[in-house]
Image (cartoon, rainbow, N blue to C red):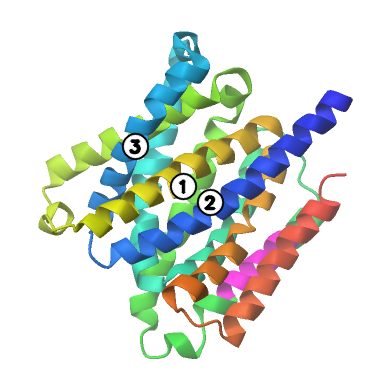
Amino acid sequence: MAERLIGMGLGEMCSLTAAATWAVGVVIYRKLGARIPPMRLNLLKNLLVLAAILPLAWVFAGAEGLHLSYPEWGLVLTSGFLGIGVADTLYFYALNELGAARMGIVGNLYSPFVILLSYLFLSERLGIAQLVGFALVAGGVLMISTGTSFAGQSSARFKPLLLGVLSIALMAGSVVMVKRVLETHSLWWVSAVRVGAGALGLFLVLTLLRDPKAAERTPMSARDWRLLALGALIGQLLSMVFWLAGYKYTTASVAAILNETASAFIVLFAWLALGEQINRRKIIGLALTLTGVSLMLALGRG
């Protein structure tokens, strides 16, 4: 019983830390997104993370951490391609159009997606509190995606909003996909393989599509490279390791709910670092989403 409590505490702490570090990364990616196309930004970010995580995986887990069955390899590779290669690229597209604060609140759809998928595929409990919390989170997202700030440009905003929602759904599906693998295998190697799959997938897509905008070589200054390295190490490497550790040491539903505190961090950091306004609609939307996840956390674990 004591080990279980310690494990749950560690999992919750990791999930909260993942939220804070991810928020730092989002603000950095928002700055870089003004100059670097999303696919290129995602590929460069993943290559930096891969270069950092491979030696860490070897040191902390050794070669035995790579002993996965063929089905497990398939799950981890697919999870990386969808959750990092595709989802992060869509997220960057939406981030450039909606801004960090709005995307932080849209990201609160993450826990409802994880809870629903965990109920369907992992046999985790889905109670009335979680259903009510889902409704509150959805209401908060609708609150910040409509209103005067979108007047006259609803169609232009609707596409990035859908891309943002799709990116969150893919992130949720990708982590539920590897939940069972994480419980029995090295966190470091699972993380490394996922990043490698995401980077390889992006490279192949860029090569095959040859999209001029995606392949555009925007000159990067030394400051851009420093920001990219900082975003990759804090907003991706540390965030991803803490994120997956949360799922390893507690239930998927609880980890997902605690990850939602990222929205509060993002709104705050976007105001401090990017000068994005915090208006009444954002405050109400944030309050609704955080109330929803708090309800799911307080009443949904019994």
Q: Position of residue 156 (x, y in %)?
A: 33, 77
For marks 1 and 3, the one nearer the N-term is 3
Q: Nearer the viewer, residue 11 or 226?
A: 226
Q: Position of residue 151 (x, y in %)?
A: 42, 90
Q: Mark 2 belongs to which amino acid?
A: Thr
Q: Is residue 137 magenta?
A: yes
For marks 2 and 3, the one nearer the N-term is 2
Asked if residue 12 can be seen in this view, the reply is yes
Residue 133 left/right relative to 301: left
Pointers 2 and 3 in contact (C-beta within 8 Å): no
Pointers 1 and 3 in contact (C-beta within 8 Å): no
Q: Residue at x 52, y 58 (%)?
A: 23
For the C terminus, which image quadrant? top right
Q: Residue at x 45, y 79 (%)?
A: 275
3D distance between C-alphas at marks 1 and 3: 18 Å
Q: Which residue is mark 1?
A: 234
For the N terminus, which image quadrant? top right
Q: Mark 3 belongs to which amino acid?
A: Gly
Residue 178 left/right relative to 57: right
30 above or below 249?
below
Residue 84 left/right relative to 112: left
Q: Which residue is mark 2?
A: 21
Viewer-side label of 2, 3: 2
Q: Is residue 190 magenta?
A: no
Tell me the element at label 1.
helix
Q: Which residue is mark 3?
A: 198
Q: Position of residue 235 (x, y in %)?
A: 46, 49
Numbered-mark total: 3
Asked if residue 124 can be seen in this view, the reply is no
3D distance between C-alphas at marks 2 and 1: 6 Å
Q: Nearer the viewer, residue 17 or 136?
A: 17
